[in-house]
Amino acid sequence: MGWEIAVMLMAGVIIGTLGVLLGIGGGVLLVPLLSVVIGVPIQSAVAASLVAVIATSSAGAGVYLERRLANPRLAITLGIGTTIGGIAGGLIGVSVGSQLLTALFALSLLAVAAITWIRRSEDERHVVIDRDEGQLGDSYYDPNLHQQVHYGVRRLPQGLGLSFVAGLSSGLFGIGGGVINVPSMVFVAGVPVKAAVATSNLMLGFTAAVSAFIYYTSGFIDVTITSVVALGVFIGSLVGARRAPRLRGATISGMLAILFATVGLLMLLRAAGHY
Amino acid sequence: MDDTEEILDALTGRVLLSGAALGLIVAIVGWGMLMFGTPTLRDPLGDPTRLLNDIWKPDPLNLMEVGILILMVTPVAGIAALTVGFFWLGRLRFALVSILLLVLMIASFTVSAG
């Protein structure tokens, strides 16, 4: 088990760093790593990934909240949707296979990847410096723009619907839902990408916790593997969260697009039964 | 955002970070025990019923499982901190949303454990 532990720890650090920079839990990369490379049974891989997502969320949110990038009011509001979705996804995930759903999810991700790539520079051209924040909006200091950014939140009902889908995908695929939360907040709710990434990171923990507990009570959590992976992503997340505010919004969006495309392709492989 | 919300955000962040760190430290201690030869009499798959019965046994896998459990309830602690903070700030709408989220999470834990 020696080399497997080293691989899981190092992979956890890298995935945790990337994940917190992009507002995702890293589960989209962890699940195929654990199941294909290490040979962990898929439901245990999903379970370990969900616990790792909690570690990512807690570490990243700790830094993002301190730096006032994450929006807790928006996170708990959208968190209602993701939590209900997470419960549903977890209950379905421990019971049934989901090849068709996986394929549909993969195709959606590829479409989101294309949209995110095309629109990646829009955020910095259109970021609103002084929009009315309203009840759910917030503000943060952007070191790249050298000024305070104020934003409000639009289309909340649609955002809640998408957050339910994010929660559902979390429970089904062992991910945090960030691959849906971040583009939903950016393109639907009009939240600047840096705030969307930070807020999504905070939400991941709520979503993953309910699904993780369902997998735990169903006997799918391998404590040896899960603790190593969670430790790796925790360390990586602490490192990544401290670097995130200095990145340009367009850089984050570009990285997100590449990630979504990669995950979409991995999910298609999974739907085809390769892992 | 005013200063009092800034305090709430920082406090919530500390709760999340500390909870996750505590859970991982407990799990690492379990790993340390395993690597230094402490025997284990169980398989690595988590089981809440077995853990409740055997929690006082010095088994490294029990410690790892406790650490993971602490990690899993850390988001609940974070939401509880937000709930208290929103009440303290007088932001009742968000306090109620937090309570709803808390109830949903605890209910799902209870249902799945049952």
Image (cartoon, coloured by chain):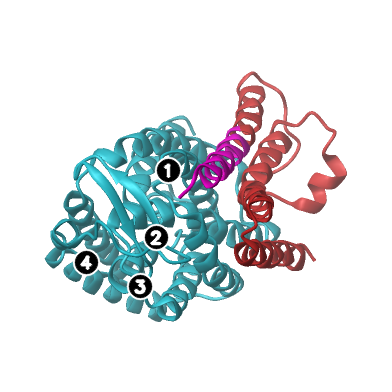
Q: Is residue A75 left or right of residue A263?
A: right
Question: Magenta residues: mostly which secondary structure?
Answer: helix
Chain of the residue under the numbered disc 4 shown in the image: A
Sort mark 2 into few (<14), some (14-19) or many (20+) by Cα contacts within 10 Å.
Answer: many
Q: Secondary structure at mark 2?
A: helix
Chain letter for the part of the structure drawn in cyan: A
Q: Chain of mark 3?
A: A
The residue beneath circle 1 is A64
Please name the amino acid that badge 2 sits on.
Gly
Element under disc 1:
helix
Q: Quadrant of the C terminus of chain A?
A: bottom left
Determine the image quadrant of residue B20: top right
User: Which residue is label 2 attached to?
Assistant: A178
Q: Are marks 1 and 4 in contact (CB under 8 Å)?
A: no
Residue A61 image point, x, y percent: 47, 45
- What type is the residue that disc 1 sits on? Tyr
Q: Position of residue A155 (x, y in %)?
A: 38, 78
Which residue is label 3 attached to?
A271
The residue drawn where x is 62% and y is 23% is B32
Residue type at tag 3: Ala
**Label 4 belongs to which residue?**
A113
Chain coloured red: which letter?
A: B
Q: CA distance from mark 2 to mark 4?
A: 13 Å
Spatial CA span between label 3 and label 1? 35 Å
Q: Residues in magenta?
A: B1-21
Quadrant of the rendered image containing residue A116: bottom left
Q: Are marks 3 and 1 in contact (CB under 8 Å)?
A: no
